[in-house]
Image (cartoon, rainbow, N blue to C red):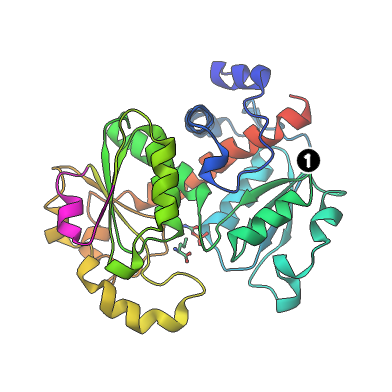
Amino acid sequence: MSSVVESFMTQALTHRKDYLSVLDFDAADFERCLQLAAQLKADRALGRLAPTADALNGRHVALLFDKPSLRTRTTFEIAIRELGGHGRRRCSPTSRSARVNRSPTSPRNLERWVDAVVIRTFSQHVLKEFAASAPRLHVVNALTDEEHPCQAIADFLTLQEHLGHLRGRTIAYVGDGNNVATSLAHAASMLGVHVHIASPEAYQLPHMVVQQATSVARHGARLRLFTDAADAVAGADAVYTDTWTSMGQEREAEVRRRIFAPCQVNDELMSLAKPGARFMHCLPAHRGEEVTSEVFESEASVVFDQAENRLHGQKALLLMLLAPSAGL
Ligand code: CP
Ligand code: NVA
C-alpha cells in the first residue's frame, strides 16, 4: 500500500459530511484532497490491485442531475466503481416533477438507502436545504448556478502538475463571474494563489464571493476584479475562461455574446500572460466565442488534463467523505 493512501486510511482525512462548496473544506482538507488525488492518479495503473480498489466497500452513491453533464457524471460513475462502490443513477435533464427541489422528502428517503448523493441542480440554497434535511447523507455539489466545487479540485490538481507549486502563482479568469469563477476564487485564495477576474461590469463576481475568498485567503493571496481582460491577464501563470452562457441562461445567449465579445481568449490576449502560461477551461467550450480554436488547440492548453483530473479529484473527495464512515 502506498504511504499516502496508508496514512489516509489510518487518519480518516476529514469528518465533514458534505462538499457543497469549496468553503466546506479548510485549506488543510483541500491540500490533502489534492495530494490524495495525485496518489490515486498514479495508482490507477494498478487497476484492481490499487490499494483503494475496495475502499468504499460496496457503499451506494446516488447521482441526481437536473442539468446535462458529460464530464462530471461520467467521472463520478467511474470514480465510484473504481473505489468499490455502487452508483445509482437518476440522471439526464429530468422531468419537472423529478427535480431535486420538487420533493422535500426525497433526502429522507435516500438516506435510508444510500450513503452519499451527488447532485447537479440549479439553486445552491435548494442543495443546502437538501443536505440539511438528511443528517446521515453525504451530499456533493456537482454544480449549481452559484458554485462548481468539484471543478476546482481538478483545476488546482492540473495547475499543480503543470506549474510545480501553487503558492504565489497568479491565475487570470476572463469572462462571466459565475459558478466556475466562484469556486476557482474560493480555492485559489485558500491555496495562496492570486486571482485576477475580468468581467463586464454587470457580470462581475458577486460581492459576497469576494468577501468569502478574502476571508479564507492564505499566504498573502489577493483577489482582484477587473473590467479589462488585458489588465487581468498581464503576467499571469494561467488564463482561464468558461462559457459566456451557463446552463439555464440560454435565452440570454445573444445578448451575452455581444457583451462578452471583448473577453475572448485569443493569441493576442495569451501573449500578455507570462511566457509559458497555461490556458484552462472547464469545458464544454464554444470555440470562436470565449476562446479561439488556436488557443484551445495550442500547446498552452491543458483543458483535457483538467477533464481527466475530474476523475482523480472526485475519487479523492469520495474517499475523504465516505471512507471514515466505511470504517477505514
Ligand atoms: N466541466 C463540467 O462540469 O463538465 P460537464 O458539464 O460535462 O459535467
Ligand atoms: N458555467 C457553466 C459550467 C459548465 C460546466 C454552466 O454552469 O453551465
Residue at 72% over, 56% down: 130
Q: Indicate the quadrant where residue 108 lies.
A: bottom right
Residue at 33% over, 69% down: 202
Image x and y of residue 123, in percent: 59, 64
158 and 101: which one is in front?
101
| Kind of residue at badge 1 | Arg
Q: Is residue 220 magenta?
A: no
Question: Considering the numbered disc 1 on the image, is that residue within a helix, a strand or a loop?
Answer: loop
39 is higher (above) or lower (below) than 90: above
Image x and y of residue 60, in percent: 78, 46
Q: Read off the magenta span.
A: 224-236
184 and 203: which one is in front?
203
49 is higher (above) or lower (below) than 127: above
Q: Is residue 226 magenta?
A: yes
Neighbour class for label 1 at 10 Å: few (<14), some, many (≥20)? Answer: many
Indicate the quadrant containing the C terminus: top left, top right, bottom left or bottom right: top right
151 is higher (above) or lower (below) than 51: below
Residue at image mark 1: 59
Would residue 92 appear left or right of 44 to someone viewing this image? Answer: right
Image x and y of residue 78, in percent: 62, 48
